[in-house]
Amino acid sequence: MPGKRTTIIFGKISFISFFFLFHFYGINAQSITPYVISSSAGVASNAQIELNSNPGELISSTLSSNGITFTQGFLQPEIYTVGIPELNPINLYVFPNPFSDSFTMRIEGSDEALEVKLYSLSGQIVFQSKLNTGVNLYQPDLPALNSGYYFLNILGVNSGRTYQFKLVKL
């Protein structure tokens, strides 16, 4: 029986020490100030005070006195997104890429003249041309180009829309 009595006493001592250990650490632990992030607007009131909350209000401080709690915060501004629909989108396809001698442009939905410029990697214009409206396929008559990287810039003459492609010459 002495073995059982020792185990019970040791069990009570470890439970008591475990309780006091966490109790004292709990007193010195960090505390978190409560805050509210509301997903919708609301109004709370009593006979003396009315509190309005709005979406996006972030709590910055809380004041309490005589059983009354006042929370002050700030509101995030409303964000409006304005979009301008593109009236006549143009679909441009350039193939093959990489190209060996020349490439082809397929133009869909264009109702304006286009200006085509091909730039070298150093920014020098190596080819330019102007396309009239109604052109669906265009294969530019390119000068002899060195192998390397080129930038194709297509500008809508009336709209100012710009389309850019990166091309590789083999």
Image (cartoon, grey):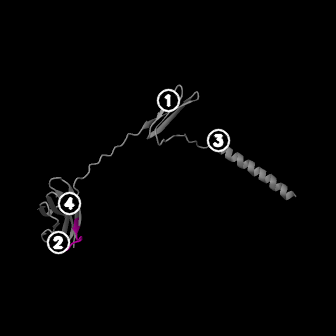
| Amino acid under disc 1 | Glu
Q: Which residue is mark 1?
A: 50
Q: Are marks 1 and 3 in contact (CB under 8 Å)?
A: no
Q: Which residue is mark 3?
A: 27
Between circles 3 and 4, the one closer to the viewer is 4
Extreme-right residue of the structure: 1
Q: Earlier in the sequence, mark 1 or mark 3?
A: 3
Q: Secondary structure at mark 4?
A: loop
Q: Secondary structure at mark 2?
A: loop
Task: Give the image location of residue 152, x and y in percent.
Answer: 19, 63
Q: Secondary structure at mark 3?
A: helix
Q: Quadrant of the N terminus?
A: bottom right
Residue visible at 19% across and 63% down in the picture: 107
| Amino acid under disc 3 | Ile
Residue at mark 1 to residue at mark 2: CA–CA distance: 74 Å
Task: Give the image location of residue 38, x and y in percent.
Answer: 48, 41
Residue 36 visible from this viewpoint: yes
Quarter where residue 100 is shown? bottom left
Residue at mark 2 to residue at mark 4: CA–CA distance: 23 Å
| Amino acid under disc 2 | Ser
Residue 101 falls within the magenta-colored stretch = yes
Q: Which residue is mark 2?
A: 102
Residue range corresponding to the magenta coloring:
93-102
Between circles 2 and 4, the one closer to the viewer is 4
